[in-house]
Amino acid sequence: MKVILTKDVEKIGSFGEVINVKDGYAKNFLIPTGMAILSTPGNLKQVDLIKKSKVKVEAKSIKEANDIAEQLNGLKLLFKVKSSAEGKMYGSHTKK
């Protein structure tokens, strides 16, 4: 039976792959647990649309991460801690 994976399944495949598995495995495990759907032309189109939207969202999040990285580049942090007269920090704090 041909099914489309809706989640990444270890040792079987990743999201959107069309795989051929035994009927019992598909009907009793993959489909009831929501890991797969039947492979039909309509479901294939739906999975393609979902893949395209995931790519757009991923590209947007990568752009946002790069923008944040640029803002943080060159940023210096200064922490004030109590120390002894010799400059040694108390407790478990170290210079590192």
Image (cartoon, helix red, strand yellow):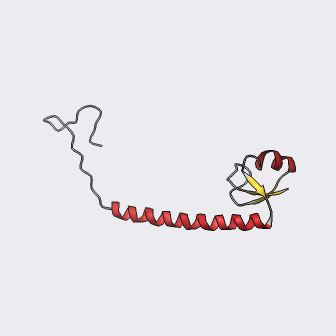
Residue 81 spot, x, y in % from top left: 21, 40
Residue closest to the eye, 3 or 76: 3
Residue closest to the eye, 95 or 77: 77
- Residue 90, picture quadrant: top left
Residue 88 spot, x, y in % from top left: 20, 36
The residue at the point 64 percent across, 65 percent down is 51
Quadrant location, the N terminus:
bottom right
Furthest toward the left, the residue is 85
Residue 3, compared with residue 60, is above or below; it is above
- Tell me: 31 left or right of 84: right
Residue 27 spot, x, y in % from top left: 83, 48
- Tell me: 89 left or right of 48: left
The residue at the point 59 percent across, 63 percent down is 54
- Residue 95, picture quadrant: top left
Residue 63, compared with residue 81, is above or below; it is below
Furthest toward the front, the residue is 42
Quadrant location, the C terminus:
top left
- Tell me: 88 left or right of 56: left
